Amino acid sequence: MVGLTLFGGMLVFMLLGIPIVFSIGLAAILATFVIGAAAPLLVVPSSMFNGMDSFPLMAIPFFILAGELMNRGGIAERLVAFANSIVGHIRGGLGHATVVSNTMLAMDTGSALAQVAAIGRIMIPAMERHGYPRAFATALTCSASLIGPIIPPSITMVIYAVAAGASVGGLFLAGVVPGLLMGGSLMAYLYFRSLVRRERPEQRFSVSEVLRTGRSALLALLMPVIILGGIFAGIMTPTESAAVAVLYAVLTGALVFRRLSWRDLYQCLLTTGIITSFIMLIVGAARIFSDLLASEGVPQAIVAALVQVTSDPTLLLLLVNLLLLGVGCLMDTTAAIIILTPVLLPVVTQAGVDPKLFGIIMCINLVIGMATPPVGVALYLASEVGKVRIERVMAAIWPLLLVQVAVLLFISYVPRVSLALPRYFGF
């Protein structure tokens, strides 16, 4: 009864147009009345505070701020130029450069939305000038930005680590190969598309250009080395490394590139505060949701129901993937992770799935939902940045999303792809 009240209430409130964070909170309050004296309203603020009172979550505002500083500090332009010098000579060159620059920027920001805003403003007009349909250029930018929350440092992985009680460092390592596969699969699609359309290479390869742009982007490329190197060497926690990343971004943007002003710093802090407050409110509200589900034994009931449907791990993993893809289309990524991790993690671990692998599977599923309606925030932002109607972007993006789903299934059923690096480093 409580589970039905929670999910049904949240769906009704969302359909009424109430923002997701308030829909979750109102559904939780409604469920406390259904439970009665066993769950007084006092549990609402208490659970909300407990959900936000986590040291690893402190990494989120630092990573967001670092990404904002890197974008305003001129990092994106340098990475795009370097990526174009490396892959611009291949068929579909500017498309490849979009994917590669998103992959590079992912190691600095960990956010799909930051990448859509930073890369889209540069690459969408450039691709259109070279003959790409603007809708396809926008769709490619959106789908390539999905690499951001998978390759470390990833804000999405931090949230899952908190919800699952898993190692942030281990999840960061588990996301490296899947993120690269997502980028590589998009590049393979772009190459075959260019062959079918008989497109010619857009420029010639130049070693001197690679060296020139590489030198310009060197400081940007060093940032993930500092962040991840500090974590895996045991020198810093993920939260501490995120704070170091902010300091590094300020110094490079203000003193080296001379692109950061006091006004830019103020805007970065303001944007970070707004985004962080939204994320933390969702984390807190979703914690109430998950605590109420746990108190009524809903996760155990779902485990029993799924086991009754099938005991085959292959089929079970397929059902979980389909469920998460559907949820990703309807719910904010942060809320979905906090609510569903306690519910689904026991199901998959009982079937023999490693929690780190499940974290990657969950994050990719939900991140794909960021590029699909009706709650596709990355899709809507890309449409706005590219100045293209949302319907045209949706028509152009579906082959790219099918490629990403194919990678997701490969990762799901070949665990060593994700787990090789964490096992090698002892996570």
Image (spheres, grey):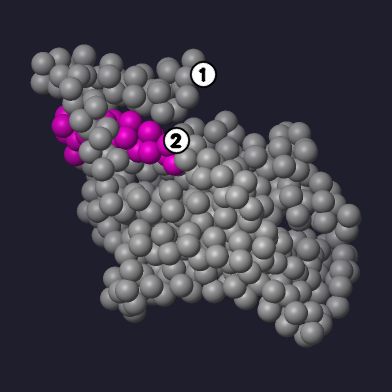
Mark seen at residue 187: none
Residue 374 lies left or right of residue 86; in this view the side is: left
Residue 141 lies left or right of residue 114; in this view the side is: right
Task: State which quadrant residue 414 falls in.
Answer: bottom left
Task: State which quadrant residue 46 falls in.
Answer: top left
Tag 2 secondary structure: helix
Q: Quadrant of the C terminus?
A: bottom left
Residue linked to disc 2: 278
Q: Nearer the viewer, residue 35 or 301?
A: 35
Residue type of the residue flagged with mark 2:
Phe
Question: Few, some or many C-alpha atoms within 10 Å of disc 1 (few <14, some 14-19, many ≥20)?
Answer: few
Residue 383, above or below 260? above
Tag 1 secondary structure: loop
Residue numbers of the magenta segment: 276-302
Q: Residue at x 40, y 68 (%)?
A: 173
183 part of magenta stretch:
no
Q: Residue at x 32, y 64 (%)?
A: 237
